[in-house]
Amino acid sequence: MSIKNLVLSNHYRDSVMLMRLSQDLEALAGIVQATAMMGTENNKTLMDEAALLTDDGRAARPNDLVIALRLSSRDLETSVVPRVRELLEAGAAPESSQSNFTPRSLDGAVEATPDANLALISVPGPYAAYEATNALDRDLNVLLFSNNVSIEDEVALKRRAVERGLFMFGPDCGTAIINGVPLGFANHVPRGRVGLVSASGTGLQQVICLLAASGEGVSQALGVGGRDLDDRVGGAMMLEGIRALESDEDTEVMVLISKPPGELTRGRILDEVSNLGMPCVVCFLGVEDQPKGSPGVFMEPTLERAATKTLALLGLDSSDIESRIVPSVTEQMSKAAKAINRESRYIRGLYSGGTLCHEALLLLRHMDDADIYSNLDLAGVRPLDGAALSGGHHLIDLGDDVFTVGRPHPIIDLRERCQHIVREAANPEVGVLLLDVMLGYGAHPDPASELAPALKEARRIASRDERSIAAVVVLCGTRGDPQSFDRQREELTGAGAIVVQSNAQAVTIAAAISRGDLRLAGNGG
């Protein structure tokens, strides 16, 4: 074995390109492991912990690209470097329909597109606030995709934006659709009558995809960042979004989405929507107490119910997305429940979306009295750190900042989740795998191509140990998404997974299989 670091000075590449480069390199003969990261201190620490860092890599600066390779033989070091450069050049080549000019700074981008009024910023967290401040000072609205930005910086940026009459979406703003243009991780949905403001990217995707399944579209979908409703931030951008949608002539129903907000912020938001000129569906996960004196405000505790209520307010049929189990799924569920050994029944939820994971915890907590562990903080749920290997369900948000420092988001890069799938299959007490698969722009181009083999391997491992393991997948997407919704569903089903569109339904099915009680899913069988 040999470790080789190639350092390219002043060679910034985004996380999507680096993920694909790493995958392409690992496909080459003789390369056992490959990772490509910018040379920040956090990234170098990660590479060092993985025993992939050499002195060359340690000397890298934050704007240098470090390609770390574990080779099967030292003899490959000379031949692999030209191949790495070829792959880099191929990834950087502009498409024929694009201009050859790529601005290398915000100033250059403003000069090249003087009519632009929004800057999408995706740089490493330590530099994100600086770039966002520059954009705001140029009177640009900002969508800050970057994560690992401090709460103090977020508060300062949003105050600056409000003072200048601008939007500052994010940080960690994963999804938005503005004037029909999808930004970040967004799905192909039609224009329509629903305006959304969301402090959750995957929560927003789930609701708009469920709406699209029943034929309804989006006027605007504004992602404000996961901490916007923290009392320290005060819902600054959700309030601005509510005011913008209230005056939007295309919006007939407003939808607000978030994990439970801070108490002060919750009151501020509900006061703001209490006298709107349109109905407002509010999904603060798990919260369903109706505010007094607000007949046009409808509190819904789950994403599915928020979508269902929205469709009802618009006079549309929501039967396609309600939590009813179609016969083919009922048959799969029944077989899985009968096959699972009661000593091998526990659920492993491997989520790329924090809000979907949070919703799953809320639902599962009321369906099963077993211990539940997670890296998310929720009453009645035990912390995952130091959790025993047995005796309970584990639901993990793999999109949490701790997993994404120096790494692509799991919506883009499925390698870690596939490793988890195979690892959990070897645990004799695990009987159900619960996954979300996010489709749309910016997401992995073909998630089933990686997840299906991992699920098949999980079934093989369980069968080898004379066990059975079930997989339940919530496939969040639309038929207009570039990955082909129907093909993704077909391939995942072919790998033995039960595939549904609603996260609430997926959790209910997983719990029913785990407990061997199909009545949990509304089936008496």
Image: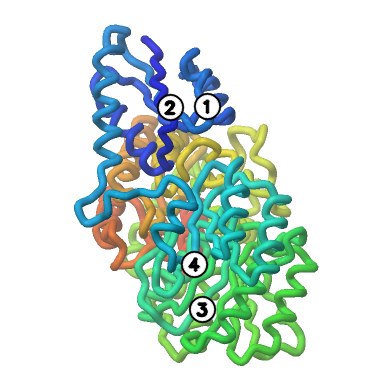
Colouring rule applied to residues: rainbow
Q: Residue 368: horizontal and vertical position, in percent?
A: 61, 55
Q: Which residue is mark 3?
A: 195
Labelled disc at residue 141: none
Q: Residue 441: horizontal and vertical position, in percent?
A: 36, 58
Label 4 crowd bin: few (<14), some (14–19), many (20+), radius 10 Å: some
Disc 1, SS:
loop
Q: Earlier in the sequence, mark 2 or mark 4?
A: 2
Q: Which residue is mark 2?
A: 9
| Residue drawn at 39 percent across, 30 percent down | 465
Front-most of 44 and 287? 44
Snapshot quadrant of residue 180: bottom left
Q: Is residue 22 above or below residue 172?
A: above
Labelled disc at residue 117: 4
Between the C-alphas of marks 2 and 4, the distance is: 32 Å
Type of amino acid under label 1: Arg
> Looking at the image, which residue sits at the far right?
264
Front-most of 75 and 504? 75
